[in-house]
Amino acid sequence: MRRANDNGGSQVLEVIHPDRRTLPVLISSPHSGRNYDPSFLGMTRLDSQAIRRSEDAFVDRLIAGVPALGAPTIAALFPRAWIDVNREPGELDCSMFEGPLNASPGHNSPRVRAGLGIIPRVVAGGAEIYRSRLPATEAQRRIASCYAPYHTTLEHLIDETLQMFGAVCLIDCHSMPSSRPACARKPVDIVLGDRFGTSCSPAVSQAATEALQAQGAMVRRNNPYSGGHITRRYGRPDLGMHAIQIEVDRRLYLDETTVKPTTGMAATARLLETAILAIAQVVRTLAKPVGTEERTLTDAGRTA
C-alpha cells in the first residue's frame, strides 16, 4: 500500500493506494478528520470533547483494510467542524462573518439555516461553535486550503478508476448517532443512501443491501439519510459513475461518550468490506469496454 498526503504535506487529506488496483470502486471518509488545530480550538467556546460531536469518529479506521482488497481510500484529516466537504461551495451563512464574502454566499438552504453549512456554526446537537464572528477572508481560506483539494483529489480518483475499469462506484462512508429501539423494533445498523435511486444503478444498492442483510445487519435505504452533496455531485450512472452513501450506526463500533473505539470495530469493518466487495462485483457487470468512450468528470461538467 502507498500513502499520499495532499497539499504539500500540510496534512489536509490522506489517500491510501493499494499495491494493485483490482476493484472498480473507491472509498471516501469526508467526516472522520480529527486534527484540531490549536488556533481553531482558540476560536471555539466548546471544550475538546464537545467540539468532536460532528465527527464521524474513526470511520477512516473502519475502511483501513480496503486498500488490501484492491481499492483506494481517501479521508479528510481536518475536522468537519472546521469545514464540511459534503456541502455545496455556496452554502455559507453570511451572519457568521464580519465583512463582505468573496465566495458566493449560499442558497438559503435548510442546512445553512440550521447552522450546518459548509463552515458549520454549530456541532451536532446544536451547540454554537464560535465565540464571535469570523473574518470574511476565513471562509475563502478554508475553501481553498481544504475543500478544493479534497474534491480535486476525489475527482482525479474517480476519473482514474473510470478509465481503468469502464465504470466506477464512489462509496461515501459516514457514521450516524446510535439508533434506539422503538417498542419492539430493532435498531437500524446501516442506512444506504442513493438519492432515491438517482446516484447509482438500482443493482448497486440492491447488492449492498443483500450482502449486509446476509450478515445479519438491519438495513434501511434513504431514510433518514439519502446522500449528501458528494453523492449527488459524483453520482452519474448514465456516464458509468455511480455513488452511494453508507451510514453506520456508531453503537456497532464506538463508545459515543468517550469517543473511543470498542471491541466491535473489527466486526464492523468486515461488515463494510462485505458490502464493498458486493458493490464492486456489480459495478464490473455495468462497465463498458475500456477505451470505447472517454468520460471524465470534467467532460460531464461536474468540477467545482
Image: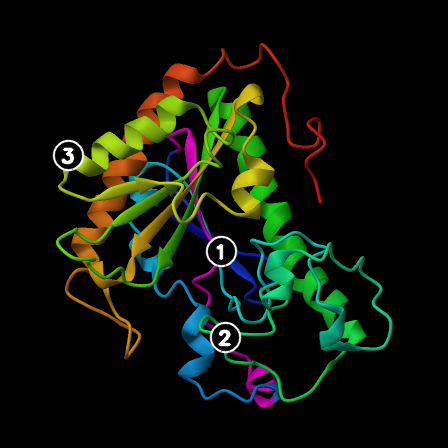
- Residue 281: quadrant of the picture: top left
Q: Is residue 16 magenta?
A: no
Q: Residue at x 66, y 55 (%)?
A: 109
Q: Which residues are magenta?
A: 21-42
Task: Report the coloring of the rendering.
Answer: rainbow
* Pointer 2 residue: 126
Look at the image and tell me whether residue 146 can be seen. Answer: no
Q: Is residue 30 magenta?
A: yes
Q: Earlier in the sequence, mark 3 or mark 2?
A: 2
Disc assigned to residue 30 = 1
User: How far is disc 2 from disc 1 in space, using C-alphas?
Assistant: 20 Å
Picture layout, residue 82 above or below residue 41: above
- Residue 134: quadrant of the picture: bottom right
For mark 2, give the secondary structure.
Answer: loop
Q: Residue at x 21, y 45 (%)?
A: 271
Direction from residue 223 to residue 104 in the image, left or right:
right
Q: Nearer the viewer, residue 39 or 15?
A: 39
**Tag 2: residue type?**
Gly
Residue 242 spot, x, y in % from top left: 48, 30
**Tag 1: residue type?**
Pro
Q: Earlier in the sequence, mark 1 or mark 3?
A: 1
Q: Is disc 3 surrounded by few (<14), some (14 to 19) or many (20+) residues within 10 Å?
A: few
Picture layout, residue 296 above or below residue 132: above
Are discs 3 and 2 less than 8 Å apart at CB?
no
